[in-house]
Amino acid sequence: MKILICSLTYPLPNGVTVSINTSIDEFLKKGIEIRVVSPDYDLGKFRPEHYPVSSSLLLKNIGVLIGREERTFGINAYFQIKEIADDFCPDAYWLHTLSWAPNAFERYIVKTNKPKVLTYHTMVEKYGGIYAGRLGMYTMRKRSKAVCEKSDAIITPSKTMEKILREYGVTKPIHIIPTGISTSEKHFTKQEICRRFGINKNSKILLYVGRISKEKNLGVLFNLIKSLKYNAVLLLVGPGEIQETIKETLRMGIGERTIFTGGLLKEDVQKIYGACDAFVFSSQSETQGLVIGEAMLSGIPVIALDSPTQKEIYPEDVAVVVRDQSKFATEVVKILENKKKRDELVKRADDFVSKNFSKEKMTEKQINIFNELINK
């Protein structure tokens, strides 16, 4: 079996890239051939299966100006993708990015008679609302339906997203397959983290991992650290709109209590979890939130804002779910000061992730989908 994958954000450090790499690693073990195409991020080939193609120079320059890394395909990308496909002769195509307009990969695969699978990773309607209000939400709902209906099968990580797609009018088969989660068995010590990032060794470290951007609802975490009457710092690990966000923390008077690491190697990120005191999360646009599972496997308590996928991804018996933003700080203090409750929560969380987010189960289900489509 041969599968050609596409993501507009590969290999940027994000949940989509993690998901794709997990699938590639597991598929290769099964003898399945993979190639992945993406816009060229001037990073070269991320792995042997990666084929960067030309990216839009205009959007690249705009992205630099506004502090965003994401790119889309350039003018020549369609022909480059066709050349890769002609050489590879894939049995199926797998799209991992849904954006505001059709991209070169989409335009190419709709002209083929090979099976097409879409993994719907992101609640793009919320992104549309953040950046373009109601019109943006409407546009992304319509785009979601259009791309799904051109696919032969859709994969999404949660039942919540299946329900939302059905509400959009999607009629194609939808398969619920959470991304398999794993983390490093080795962790930095708290002393190492404090030394590396200039943190007072007596401070409690609240960790956030993910993009630094509007759609992650980080204002909630900034209000948390501002209202927290506790010797604690907020450590934000991830790339994105960092300079703009730092200015926001300075305006709020929390500059000394917020530390931005920027993008780090995946291996380093996974070693950071276990050195922190708690993981805090405020995004409400995630379809799964892989970082929540990684935190749970790393042995630290998760305190997260309620979201549409909360019951499936971080139910109340394995995480502290905050439904009133004004009480976020109170919930953080409760869990930090109650060792018995914290230890019980961490144990249940580890069991929950190990049982529900297995890489092996994920891969088996994905392969079955492709086998069924290819052998029709």
Image (tube, grey):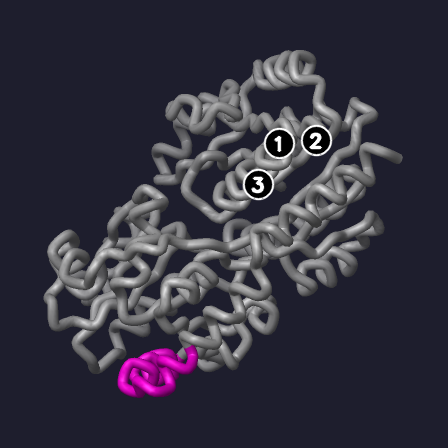
> Horizontal and vertical percent for residue 236?
30, 57
- Along the line of sight, which residue is nearer the eye, 134 or 364? 364
Q: Amino acid at mark 2?
A: Tyr
Q: Position of residue 78 (x, y in %)?
A: 63, 18
- Relative to 173, 313 lies left or right: left
Say which quarter of the image contains residue 27. top right
Circle 3: residue type: Glu
Q: Marks 2 and 3, how far apart in space?
A: 17 Å
Quadrant holding the N terminus: top right
Question: Mark 2: which secondary structure?
Answer: strand
N-terminal of the pair, mark 2 or mark 3, is 3
| Tags 1 and 3 touching, CB below 8 Å | no
Relative to 373, residue 128 above or below: below
Secondary structure, magenta segment, majority class: helix
* Crowdedness near tag 1: few (<14), some (14–19) or many (≥20) residues, C-alpha within 10 Å: many
Residue at which label 3 appears = 26
Q: Can you identify the residue that label 1 sits on?
A: 5
Q: Reading the chain from its start, which is encountered first: label 1 or label 3?
A: 1
Q: Which residues are magenta?
A: 326-345
Instruction: Give how far across and how far down residue 260 sits, in percent.
Output: 25, 53
* Residue indicated by mark 2: 93
